[in-house]
Image (cartoon, rainbow, N blue to C red):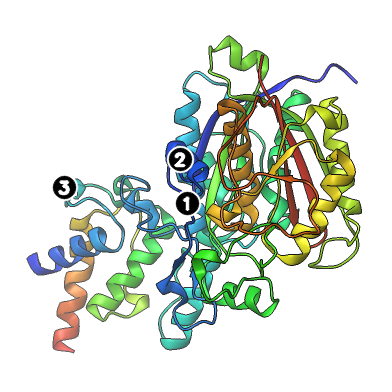
Amino acid sequence: MRNIEQHIIEILVDKFGIEKNQVTVNDELLNFGMDSIAIIELKFELLKKFELEQEDLNIYEDDSINVLLNKIGPLIEEKKYA
Amino acid sequence: MPNKKRVVISGLGIISSAGDSIQDNWENLTQGNVMVKQDPRLEGLQVDFCCPIEGFPTSKQIDKSLAWRIDRFIQFALYAAKQAVADADLDFSTLNKKRVGIVLGNSLAGVTMLESTYSKLHMESEQPVSASLIPGAMGNMAVGQIALQFGITGPSLLIGTACASGADAIGLAKKMLENDECDIVLAGASEAPITKLIVSSFASLGALSTNPNPSEASRPFDEDRSGFVISEGAGILVLEQESHATERGAEIYAAVTGYGSSNDAFHVTSPHKDGVGLKSSMQQALADAQLSPNDIEAINAHGTSTVLNDRTESAAIFDVFGKNPLVTSTKGVTGHCLAAAGAIEAIYSVLSIKNNIVPPVAGLKKLDKSINVSIAHSKINELKINSVLSNSLGFGGQNASLIFSRYN
């Protein structure tokens, strides 16, 4: 999980230009300036990074990094044992 | 018609190859420093030089969390707008934002983003196209991003009259203020055309200089000129009703007194051989300003350094003004940034009035003998300037002329 969290933060910082010290795991993505269009982009990035299927992942502006971890973690686990 | 409101300029913002501040631009302009460089973005092309803006954007200029999702021309527009707003000392918390407008000019929209996304799509067809492409590349999004930045809710318009767009945007803003539709309008233009596709296309048209010595390529009015040097940038002016500006104690640079526009209806890319349309726009601007030709001390010509433009423009200027005004072209320094040129040169015209200086035509060595207006040769020309006319011409037969006057 820790690893996934680091990857998500890395994407937010490198691709979306969010200051590292601004990122907290409990804040809604909207609070980092991630609007609906940025959320679509973030989804593309996460699908690519974790090699997930598009239909398996839905993310929203009011999700936090913790919420994302809870969505992505099980999908990665599932893939491992598939 | 009720009395027209007087329109003044209370703020300036600029980013061009000559710098990202008013001071840097003016210094490079008056020194005649040529900004042409070879550009890695154009590597492999026949014309691989331009007047670029290097190192842009830094995180100080545009927030990184926004920069990734908007085209370079929007980044330029936002940066220039922020500068102009700060220069005018506008406090949006105290303004009626419905009475603040935005009118910008642009020609090629987000071609940088479009071109790179298209290339990527060809290379990696499985990858989804960025969701930010449309909102990050549409022409009107320069206006939209500025409205978002400041919470401006008045009229917001994008003008597309090719290389006359910047001048037409300022002209339209002037009318909106005169007619009391707004208290303030942010007016200007932005362009980021330096991509392989666009430069190749202008080269195919024969519009770009192919001078083997790039630093001598942009040479308006010179006997050996062979085309323009492409450039990029943005200029934004805060235009304001005089009464509004004085009430809030704004510092006023100059008044916008005249505007004229016309179409040659002659050829898609060439100016009318007799300059009919341009003469008409200059005469309209004079009439609008209630000035006579003798009242204009200086002209910032479109002066692209193409054979046709410089010849027909100077002939049209001679027909309307004779040899009296001192004519310059600042494109010898900055190159030609298409839609943004009219706005950037409007700023230079205002600075000419402020400083009583006509910047020299950089790159000019030997004046074309067919040009019989008074050209500002390669030295700083000091003279008392009360009114400056600025011309902009564009593909599609567009002509626009603006007059700026000393504010008393």
Residue B140 visible to an observer of this rendering? yes
**Same chain check for tags 3 and 2:** no
Q: Amino acid at mark 1?
A: Asn
SS for tag 2?
Answer: helix
Left or right of B233 in this view: A28? left
Kindly identify which chain the residue marked by label 2 belongs to: B
Q: Assign a secondary structure to mark 1.
A: loop
Q: Which residue is mark 3?
A: A21
Q: Residues within 10 Å of mark 1 (few under 14, many from 20)?
A: some
Closer mark to the observer between disc 1 and disc 3: 1
Q: Nearer the viewer, residue A22 or B388?
A: B388
Q: Residues within 10 Å of mark 2 (few under 14, many from 20)?
A: some
Q: Between marks 1 and 3, how big is the CA–CA gap?
A: 42 Å
Q: Residue at 85% across / 45% down in the picture?
A: B318
How many numbered marks does the figure carry? 3
Query: Residue B172, position in %: x, y?
Result: 74, 38
In the image, are marks 1 and 3 on the same chain?
A: no
The N terminus of chain B: image quadrant: top right
Give me the disc on residue B27: 2
Q: Position of residue B38 (x, y in %)?
A: 44, 70
Which sits earlier in the primary sequence, circle 2 or circle 1? 2
Residue B20, horizontal then vertical, whole percent: 42, 45
- In the rendered image, which residue does mark 1 sit on? B33
Name the outermost residue toward the left.
A2
Picture quarter with the C terminus of chain B: top right
